[in-house]
Amino acid sequence: MSKGESGFIVNAWRQMIGSLYSMSIHHVVLFFVRGGEGDARFSEMYVLMHVCLSIVCLPLLTHLRIPSYVETIVLFYAAYRIFETVLANINIFLSPNPNLTSIRRSIILLFHNYIELLFWFACIYLLRHGWFEYVAGSASATPLNKSVISSLYFSVVTMTTLGYGDIWPIKDLGRIIVSIQTLIGLFMGITILARFIAMLPQVSTKDPEEQNEITKYQKGFARLVAEECEKKREKHKQGQDKPKC
């Protein structure tokens, strides 16, 4: 798709997101190992490794006495993985040719990303538990740094936008992180749903009237595509553009 067809804003975001993603650990490793070519197996192992890492980190941070510098490393790496995961999915969304290996595979990987982010956000809430308050006497009044379930529970209700109101941020940074997770939850939820819908078989009908309407629509769409292709061929003949039909 040319710049004129995509529009300035689409191309600007595509270039910005693509440039940021090209500096990610995943992309850099692929560049040196595979010469920039995609490797489905490596990507799957990369995702699975980080899902396991996020799950393991949460109970370790809860039950072990971790040095402050290790907590800082975990905090920054959790933030990085959240950023990298969202960046990768936006990059796929903006790509004119995403070239997905399989829609079913992409849904499963996206679900793994969703689970990973739940645990990374839970780690952040655990490490920054002082940013939050609790309803006195409620079942969830256990401080986020004292229970794996409490921090994970708050992450889940935030990511799914349930928001029961028994735990809430009292610091501006806490409010910012909760807002970011809510937006990410909405984006990833919609993305999973969209890819799932893309897998569904095409709906057919036996009603003659509905069949005629579908046929008219398909013919009209085919005519519009043919006219657009003809315009592109004319531009190519004049040296203005390359045909992509």
Image (cartoon, grey):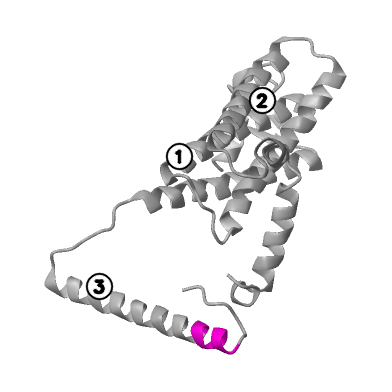
Circle 3 is placed at which residue position? Answer: 214
Residue 234 colored magenta?
yes
- Disc 3 marks which amino acid? Ile
Circle 1 is placed at which residue position? Answer: 105
Quadrant housing residue 16: bottom right
What whole-number distance in Å separates the C-alpha atoms at marks 3 and 1? 31 Å
Q: Residue at x 67, y 60 (%)?
A: 14
Q: Residue at x 56, y 37 (%)?
A: 114
User: Is label 2 in a helix, a strand or a loop?
Assistant: loop
User: Is label 3 in a helix, a strand or a loop?
Assistant: helix
Q: Is residue 91 left or right of residue 226?
A: right
Using the image as rendered, state which of residue 164 and residue 201 is in the foreground.
201
Tell which tag, 2 or 1, sits nearer the viewer. 1
Quadrant housing residue 206: bottom left
The label on residue 136 is 2
Q: Position of residue 43 (x, y in %)?
A: 58, 35
- Disc 1 marks which amino acid? Arg
Mark 2: give few (<14), some (14-19) or many (20+) Cα within 10 Å. few
